Amino acid sequence: MEYVLAGSFLDELPARLIGDKAYDSDKLDQWLSREYGIEMIAPNRSRRSKTQDGRPLRRYRRRWRVERLFAWMHNFRRLVTRWEYHIENFLGFVHLACLQMLLRHL
């Protein structure tokens, strides 16, 4: 997780991170809030003590939009198998795929 946050291209870190059930960990919650001031939103695994109530989990329900975007990107063979050597070319094809998806759904 530390490498993901360090490799972020954002100017500032987000206030909340949304993850699936694998990210439901007390250690991770404490580490993120202590080191970075980030709230972790993840549905509870099957365990005795629940760490979150239902209010933050409403944000988790909107996560399907991001998952759907990545599923749609798998329709573009050039993105699934990264044939591009330079990252700038690959990013250009990602932009083209997003533009094509946007125009298709307008």
Image (cartoon, rainbow, N blue to C red):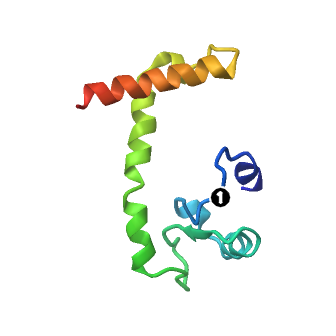
Q: Quadrant of residue 34?
A: bottom right
Q: Amino acid at mark 1?
A: Leu
Q: Residues within 10 Å of mark 1 (few under 14, many from 20)?
A: some
Closer-to-camera residue (93/74): 93
Q: Residue at x 53, y 71 (%)?
A: 45
Vertical arrangement, residue 8 with respect to residue 45, above or below:
above
**Secondary element at image label 1:** loop
* Foreground residue among 71 and 88: 88
Residue pointed to by mark 1: 13
Report x, y in % for residue 12: 66, 56
Please state if 87 lies on the left or on the right of 99 as rendered.
right
Seen at 27% across and 25% down, the residue is: 104
Looking at the image, residue 27 sits to the left or right of residue 58; the answer is right
Q: Quadrant of the N terminus?
A: bottom right
- Outermost residue on the front side: it is 11
Most foreground residue, 100 or 18: 100
Q: Position of residue 68 (x, y in %)?
A: 38, 41
Question: Would residue 46 appear left or right of 103 to someone viewing this image?
Answer: right
